C-alpha cells in the first residue's frame, strides 16, 4: 500500500461528502417544511409528498446513466457538473409558486443528485483499498449526516420565523465549495469501455420505473382515476419485463442485473431494498406526526427529529470496530430486529409522551439504523472486481433510491388508508401508529436475504475472522509444508 493511501481514505471521502451533505440537508429541510409550503400553496399537506417523490423518481430515472457517463467523460467532470445542476435546481425551488412548479424544480435537482452521489461513491471505491473501505465509508457519510442534524431545526426555524423559500438557497455556498475542492483534489479518471451506450435499455427501464413509481404513488389517493392508476402500474411492470428480456440479449445493459448473483452484493441490494423501504417512510411520517398530530411548530418538530441523525453520527465512529468484531452477517441479522423494534416503538408516541423520551428513542434508533446502512453499503462491494465497480454502484444506487421512493409512497398510502377506515377528513395523532407498525414489519423482511450469508462474508473488508475463516487460513499455511 502506498504512503498516499491512508490520506486518500480520509481526504477523498470528505470531499465527496460535500455533495452528500448538500443532498441530505435538502431532503431533511424540505420534509420539515412541507406543512408550511402546503399552506403557502393552499394545498393538502399530504399532496406535498409529491415534491419528495418527484425528486426520488428523478434519481431513479437518471442514476442508470451515472456509471456509463463517469467512465466516458471522467468522474470529476461528471461530479462537478452534477453539483452545478443540483444547485440550479435548488435555486429554482426557491422561486416556485405552485405544486407543479415545485415538482418540476425537484426533478431538476434529482438529475444532479442522480450523478453526484453514485459517481462520488465510485471515486471512493476506486481510490481506497478494500481493507480500508469500512472506515472510508464512515468518513464519507459522517459529514453528510450533519445535513440531517442541521436540516430539521434549520428548516423548522426558517419555516416558522421566516420564509420557506430561503431553505433551498442554503445549497449555493455548499455547491460552490464542493466544486472547488473536487477540481483541486480529485483526478479526472476515466475507465476504458468498449461497450456502446444502451439506449434501448435506458428507454425501457426509465419508462418502466417512472410509470410504476408514479402509479404506486397515486394508489388510493383519489387524485387520478382508478383506471389511470391501473394503466400506469400495468404499463410500468410491462416495460420493466421488457427490459429484463432485453438484458438477456445484450452484452452491456445500462443496468447489469446479473451482479445480483454475487452473494454479498445480492444480499445488500435485495435485503437493503426492503430495509430502506421502511426507513424511507420515516422522514415523511415523523415530521407530519409531530406537527399535524401533536400540534408542534416546524421548528419544535425539527429540534426533536434531529436526534435520529445525531445518533447516526455517533455510530459512524464505532462502525469499524463493531463490524470487525462481530462480522457483517451477525451485525445485519441482529440489527434488523433492533431497527424494526425501534420503528414500531414510534407508533406508541402520543401528544402526552415526554419530549425527552421521544428524543432518546430517536437518538438510539438513529444509531442502529446508521450501523445497518454502513454494513449494507460496505458489504455490497466486498466481492466486486474493480472493473465492475461502476456497474455495481449504478445498480446499487438505483435500488436505494427506488426503495426510498417506495417508502415515502407507502407512508402516505398508509395514512390515507387509516383516514378512509376512520371516516375522518383530517389526521389525528392516533392515525400514525398503524403506519409505523406496518413499516416495522416490512423492516423484518430482509432477514430472508441475510440468513444465507456465510459467517465470514466480506471478511477481507471487515477484518472479521470467524472460526471457519481461521481454520481455512491455517489449512492454506499447512498445505505447502505437507507437499
Image: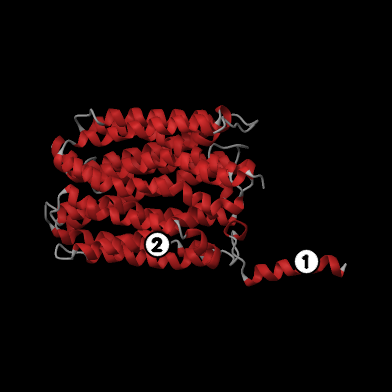
Number of numbered callouts drawn: 2
Front-lying residue, 320 or 398: 320
Residue 369 at x, y = what percent? Answer: 39, 59
- Residue 226 in view: no
Residue 398 at x, y = what percent? Answer: 46, 43
Distance in Å between CA atoms under marks 2 and 1: 38 Å
Residue position for label 2: 368
> Crowding at label 1, few (<14), some or many (≥20) Cα neighbours within 10 Å?
few
Q: Do the residues labelled 2 and 1 touch (CB within 8 Å)?
A: no
Q: Which quarter of the picture shows residue 117?
A: top left
Residue position for label 1: 477
100 left or right of 255? Answer: left
4 left or right of 175? Answer: right
Q: Residue furthest right?
A: 483
Residue 56 to residue 371: above or below? above
Residue 15 to residue 377: above or below? above
Name the secondary structure under disc 1. Answer: helix
Residue 176 to residue 402: above or below? above
Dividing the image into 4 quarters, which one contains the C terminus? bottom right
> Crowding at label 2, few (<14), some or many (≥20) Cα neighbours within 10 Å?
many
Q: Residue at x 17, y 64 (%)?
A: 350
Q: Residue at x 56, y 63 (%)?
A: 453
Q: Which quarter of the picture shows residue 458?
A: bottom right
Q: Residue at x 22, y 63 (%)?
A: 356
- Give the colouring mode of the picture: secondary structure
Q: Which of marks 2 and 1 is nearer the N terminus?
A: 2
384 left or right of 160? Answer: right
Front-lying residue, 142 or 449: 142
67 left or right of 339? Answer: right
Front-lying residue, 343 or 81: 81
- Residue 379 in view: yes
Residue 218 at x, y = what percent? Answer: 27, 44
Amino acid at each position: 500500500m502506498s504512503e498516499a493511501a491512508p490520506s486518500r481514505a480520509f481526504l477523498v471521502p470528505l470531499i465527496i461528502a460535500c455533495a452528500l451533505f448538500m443532498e441530505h440537508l435538502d431532503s431533511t429541510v424540505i420534509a420539515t417544511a412541507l406543512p408550511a409550503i402546503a399552506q403557502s400553496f393552499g394545498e393538502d399537506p399530504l399532496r406535498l409528498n409529491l415534491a419528495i417523490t418527484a425528486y426520488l423518481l428523478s434519481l431513479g430515472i437518471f442514476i442508470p446513466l451515472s456509471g456509463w457517463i463517469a467512465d466516458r467523460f471522467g468522474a470529476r467532470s461528471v461530479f462537478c457538473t452534477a453539483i452545478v445542476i443540483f444547485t440550479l435546481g435548488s435555486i429554482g425551488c426557491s422561486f416556485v409558486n405552485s405544486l407543479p412548479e415545485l415538482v418540476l424544480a425537484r426533478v431538476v435537482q434529482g438529475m444532479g443528485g442522480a450523478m453526484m452521489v453514485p459517481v462520488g461513491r465510485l471515486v471512493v471505491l476506486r481510490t481506497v483499498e478494500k481493507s480500508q473501505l469500512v472506515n472510508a465509508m464512515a468518513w464519507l457519510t459522517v459529514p453528510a449526516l450533519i445535513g440531517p442534524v442541521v436540516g430539521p431545526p434549520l428548516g423548522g426555524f426558517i419555516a416558522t420565523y421566516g420564509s420557506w423559500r430561503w431553505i433551498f438557497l442554503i445549497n449555493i455556498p455548499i455547491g460552490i465549495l464542493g466544486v472547488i475542492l473536487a477540481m483541486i483534489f480529485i483526478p479526472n479518471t476515466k475507465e476504458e469501455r468498449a461497450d456502446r451506450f444502451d439506449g434501448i435499455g435506458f428507454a425501457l427501464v426509465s419508462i418502466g420505473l417512472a410509470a410504476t413509481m408514479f402509479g404506486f404513488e397515486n394508489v388510493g389517493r383519489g387524485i387520478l382515476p382508478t383506471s389511470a392508476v391501473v394503466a400506469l402500474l400495468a404499463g410500468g411492470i410491462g416495460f420493466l419485463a421488457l427490459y429484463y428480456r432485453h438484458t438477456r440479449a445484450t452484452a452491456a445493459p445500462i443496468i447489469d442485473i446479473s451482479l445480483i448473483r454475487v452473494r454479498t452484493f445480492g444480499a445488500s441490494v435485495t435485503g437493503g431494498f426492503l430495509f430502506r423501504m421502511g426507513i424511507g417512510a420515516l422522514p415523511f411520517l415523523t415530521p407530519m406526526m409531530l406537527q399535524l398530530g401533536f400540534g408542534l411548530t416546524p421548528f419544535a418538530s425539527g429540534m426533536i427529529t434531529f436526534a435520529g441523525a445525531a445518533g447516526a453520527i455517533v455510530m459512524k465512529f464505532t462502525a469499524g470496530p463493531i463490524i470487525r468484531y462481530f462480522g457483517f452477517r451477525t451485525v445485519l441479522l441482529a440489527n434488523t430486529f433492533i431497527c424494526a423494534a425501534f420503528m414500531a416503538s414510534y407508533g406508541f408516541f402520543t401528544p402526552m409522551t415526554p419530549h425527552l423520551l421521544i428524543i432518546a428513542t430517536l437518538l438510539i434508533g438513529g444509531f442502529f439504523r446508521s450501523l445497518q446502512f454502513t454494513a449494507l453499503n460496505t458489504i455490497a462491494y466486498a466481492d466486486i472486481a474493480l472493473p465492475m465497480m461502476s456497474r455495481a454502484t449504478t445498480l446499487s444506487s438505483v435500488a436505494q433510491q427506488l426503495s426510498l421512493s417506495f417508502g415515502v409512497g407507502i407512508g402516505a398510502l398508509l395514512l390515507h388508508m387509516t383516514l378512509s377506515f376512520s371516516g375522518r377528513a383530517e389526521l389525528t395523532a392516533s392515525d400514525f401508529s398503524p403506519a409505523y407498525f406496518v413499516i416495522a414489519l416490512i423492516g423484518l423482511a430482509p432477514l430472508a436475504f441475510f440468513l444465507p450469508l456465510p459467517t465470514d462474508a466480506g471478511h477481507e473488508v471487515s477484518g472479521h475472522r470467524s472460526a471457519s475463516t481461521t481454520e481455512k487460513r491455517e489449512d492454506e499455511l499447512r498445505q505447502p509444508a505437507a507437499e
